[in-house]
Amino acid sequence: MKLVIKNLNKTYKNGVKAIDDLSIEVGVGMFGLLGPNGAGKSSLMRTIATLQKPDSGSVHFGDINVLEQQTEFRKILGYLPQDFGVYPKVSAYELLHYFARLKGITHSKERKEIVDSVLNVTNLYGVRKKHVSGYSGGMKQRFGIAQLLLNNPKLIIVDEPTAGLDPAERHRFLNVLREIGSNNTVIFSTHIVDDVQELCHEVAILNGGRILQRSTPKEAEQSIEGKIWSKEVTREEAIELNKSLNILSSSYTETNNLVIRVYSDDSLASEGFKQVSPNLEDIYFVALKNN
């Protein structure tokens, strides 16, 4: 099934245009939606999840008109928002059984099989009797995935799921998403380039409520092949070079100098720059700076 969004618009009462005539199609697999904070990612996710109405436009998932058939659509939707609350002093096992009953899974044997299955998929079975409120950040996010899998969703939306996780928790969470992403349509919304690089077969860059670019990570990198240059400079030199060059990013060296990455159609070899292979982070910054 394919998610098809056409000419979607949303402006809030304070005048902020969060979604600007956005059109996109998303098929089966992991789809990355990459953009800075405030780009409109969460507004788009909430609109697709039927938590807010757009001003205009349409959203279809397969044969379902999402904006007009919300109840039917929610039966096949799994949504993990950026922040979600949990009941205190309730175990994951109890809470998942409660959510399963809310989703219409009334037969006790079937419900137990489904709950056990999602606990195993998310690697939480061993801590199923522990209170969810006492889980670490990464465990809570994996619990969020477990609850959205209860109804075997066809479309899964995860909004900034790794923000605030330590490296080990992030790795475990991404492994869970990788496992479920092969057979479902998954929209992975984030500002973390490395997450998209690791998981997604397609990526769209969003800013100002508009899609700036869409491609596979490999195609995106090939589009700027030969145009990324690198050089180690002092901080003072970097400030001066920034006046004339398109500096995309910089990182400190052990000597407290900076290694800068520059986008340029022209050769910078005569200025001491070295041509380097582009990466998805370069694509991201080029798209943001050129639009």
Image: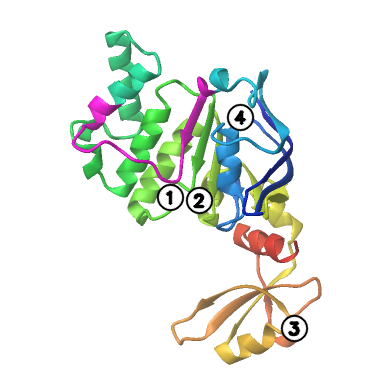
The residue under label 4 is 28
Q: Residue at x 43, y 44 (%)?
A: 174
Query: If the image is split into quadrants, where does the C terminus sit?
Result: bottom right
Horizontal side of 164 relative to 87 (left or right) equals right
Horizontal side of 71 relative to 24 (left or right) equals left
Whether residues under marks 3 and 1 lie with C-beta atoms below 8 angstroms apart, the answer is: no
Label 1 secondary element? loop
Horizontal side of 248 relative to 189 (left or right) equals right
Whether residues under marks 1 and 2 lie with C-beta atoms below 8 angstroms apart, the answer is: yes
Label 4 secondary element? loop
The residue under label 3 is 244
- Label 1, label 2: how far apart the Cα atoms are: 8 Å
- Label 3, label 1: how far apart the Cα atoms are: 36 Å
For the residue pair 201 and 56, the one nearer the viewer reads as 56
Mark found first going from the N terminus, 1 or 2: 1
The residue under label 1 is 162
Label 3 secondary element? loop
- The answer to which quarter of the image holds residue 90 is top left
Above-or-below relation of 251 to 47: below
- Label 3, label 2: how far apart the Cα atoms are: 32 Å
Mark found first going from the N terminus, 3 or 1: 1
